[in-house]
Amino acid sequence: EYLDQISRTDDNVAALLHVDREAALARAAEVDRRREAGETLGPLAGLPVIVKDNICMRGVPATCASRMLENFVPPYDAHVIEQLQAADAVLIGRANLDEFAMGSSCENSAFKPTRNPWNRECSPGGSSGGSAAAVAARMAPLAVGSDTGGSIRQPAAFCGVVGMKPTYGRVSRYGLVAFASSLDQIGPFSTDVHGSALLLETLAGHDVRDTTSVDQPVPSYTETLEQPLEGLRVGIVKEHFGDGLDEEVGTAVHAAIDAYRSLGAEVKEVSLPHSKYSVAAYYIIAPSEASSNLARYDGVHYGHRAEKFENMVDMYETSRGEAFGDEVKRRIMLGTYALSSGYYDAYYLKALKVRRLIREDFDKAFADVDVIAGPATPTTAFRIGELIDDPLAMYLNDIYTIGANLAGIPGISLPCGQSGAGLPIGLQLLAPPFEEERLLRAARMYE
Ligand code: GLN
């Protein structure tokens, strides 16, 4: 059924880069056969899952929506792919993204822009726009994305689905193509909170192949999900309701916070005084790490190699020049500049210090409240083409989501209404590190 839904809708939505119908059907038949044989099956038995195209799966192209990796077929599985296979999920397709996960609209894909299923003139958000749009268009009940600065939560908000970024270290990054390694985290998309709880249970867990993966037990999120949190203290960040917030989004989010009040929660104002520097710090740190991570695409090891070149340096330059898109080049230049001698202290080191202050703001806020609630994005989905020539306006889309990546804390976006134009609005909830269970329960209370 889901494969048929893909055939019916994906010409219009363009959420997917690759679907292997035969392999998916064979896998589903295999799961069925084992069920009939009375075998014990995993928690995702037979459930179709779509995976963002920057997560490696053996024998299946992983393009990162880049010409650079157009013909790259990984010889190994990411940790999350192993986990999904072991849970008996059926992997049915690969989702579009902004090239190397750099962007907020899916327009930076080298292949095609994905469209928002609620209004095809609009962007689904990004970078995991394909994963979000696929779930919104019911091409799969579950999808996997990655979130470096908001790339799961912002598209979830734009597409009216649930999307969650776990604590940094909760899910192994082994096999996720690196963008900014200290910020990247894999997480779930689903139609409801239960789906994200279920999928996160499978994705999460310690893995020695990612040295930043944390060895902590993973609670059963689905088991406690239906238990409301007694005496919940909800923080609202005063800096999140200022200039730049669209009125309709603000109204819907305030209504959601009122719903928490009526459920017995105590609502308190908290302050994140350094949050105004989060976009600036992020756009030093993320490009710096990207400039280093993307140095591996040299036309030698793998990826695109130019056909014509004069010498080795020319081969590097021509290969990279031909195969990277504008935004990727912009990030590499920004990052290389920020890391270069003479500028390192003024930019990179300074940004790291600001990052620490941002983390400390969250620590202080969470001394008073259990979760923080606010808008996931300043506006509803913008039109395709509207922001593409204005990188700064595009970067500001992440203003409410980036803090969680800089601080390493978990965050979730869930639907909380729609605008007059019928576009979804997202409520973001944040919790202290490794409190995904609390976060999911708080989200479920509202849902
Ligand atoms: N939009 C942000 C960026 O362009 C975040 C992307 C992401 O989370 N991968 O970097």
Image (cartoon, helix red, strand yellow):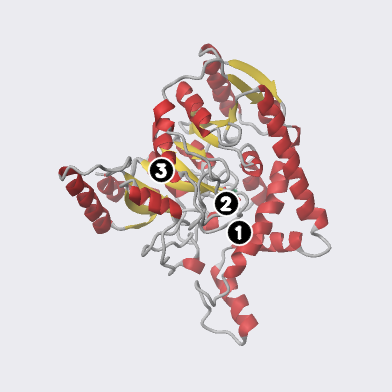
Q: Residue at x 58, y 51 (%)?
A: 212
Q: Which residue is mark 1?
A: 327
Q: Is mark 2 within 8 Å of ligand 1?
A: yes
Above or below for 403 versus 328: above
Mark 1, Cα crowd under 10 Å, few <14 / some 14-19 / many 20+, is: some
Q: Are marks 1 and 3 in contact (CB under 8 Å)?
A: no
Residue at horizontal 44 percent and vertical 32 percent from the top: 221
Label pair 2/1, CB-CB below 8 angstroms: yes
Q: Residue at x 60, y 36 (%)?
A: 433
Residue that mark 2 sits on: 103
Mark 1, ligand 1, within 8 Å: the answer is: yes
**Residue lying at 54% horizontally and 76% vertically, measured from the top left:** 299
Which label was assigned to residue 202? Answer: 3
Q: Is residue 300 above or below residue 33?
A: below
Compared with 174, 399 (above or below) is: above
Circle 3 or circle 2, nearest the eye: 3
Q: Of the two numbered discs 1 and 3 on the same chain, state the one appearing first in sequence.
A: 3
Spot occupied by residue 425 in the image (x, y as percentages of width and height): 51, 31
* Distance between the alpha carbons at the discs numbered 3 and 2: 27 Å
